[in-house]
Amino acid sequence: NAGVTQTPKFRVLKTGQSMTLLCAQDMNHEYMYWYRQDPGMGLRLIHYSVGEGTTAKGEVPDGYNVSRLKKQNFLLGLESAAPSQTSVYFCASTLSSGGSYEQYFGPGTRLTVT
Amino acid sequence: GENVEQHPSTLSVQEGDSAVIKCTYSDSASNYFPWYKQELGKRPQLIIDIRSNVGEKKDQRIAVTLNKTAKHFSLHITETQPEDSAVYFCAAVYGNNRLAFGKGNQVVVIP
């Protein structure tokens, strides 16, 4: 099993450009999450999904959109990138059933917006 | 939502000594508390977790204690080694299996 994978690993955008980050998991997990990690700020939840076709806002959703068309994939979109979105983005997933709360993280995407 | 605070922000210890990191949480309904270790440039990895029906859990040199009354939990690393140097995050679960993370502790083990 590959676990949780993320594409791309690195990206540089100019202000105003758009892009989509892809998260894929092969563990048949129901719940998926997108976080951003900034120095000294820990991991902050952007959006999450509790199943195929569902999405919900997290702690810092502004400027991002998400879609979960397939159970194994969770996409994070930036429609008009801003320098404040320079960050490391992590995707995570969890099983959800049977009281299983452990979140498995992808390797991260380092995004720089100039 | 849940609010998790983590102290101290940086902890330096001599190799072989113990390290303790403490976290507090706000939501008394939280029932799951994981600790993640993140090495530089890597993803967070779960190292130990505890549920609210248990007061202490140990795995080799790592232990976690939970005080539900005071709403705090702590990570204990004994006989620290250079490979323990990393950032450690505590978290607490809340609605829809979301995790609220603390801001992280940088642990530096001095050889």
Image (cartoon, rainbow, N blue to C red):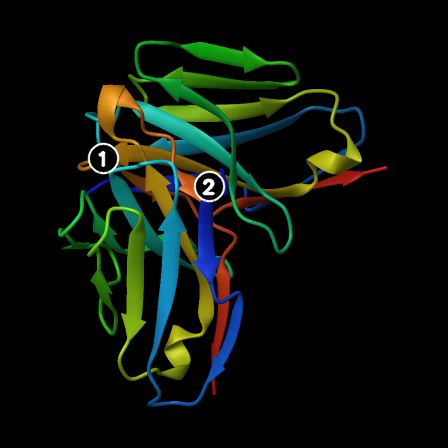
The location of residue B59, given as percent across then percent down, is 58, 15
Residue at 32% x, 29% y: name it.
A101
| Figure check: B23 above or below B106 | above
Residue at 46% x, 11% y: name it.
B56
The location of residue A8, given as percent across then percent down, is 48, 67
**Mark 2 highlights which residue?**
A3
User: Between marks 2 and 1, how big is the CA–CA gap?
Assistant: 24 Å
Discs 2 and 1 lie in a common subunit: no
The location of residue B65, given as percent across then percent down, is 46, 17
Q: Amino acid at mark 1?
A: Tyr
Residue at 75% x, 21% y: name it.
B79
Res. B29 image quadrant: top left
Q: Amino acid at mark 2?
A: Gly
In the image, is B13 to the left or to the right of B43?
right
Q: Is residue B107 visible?
A: no
Which quarter of the image is occupied by the N terminus of chain B?
top left
**Mark 1 highlights which residue?**
B94
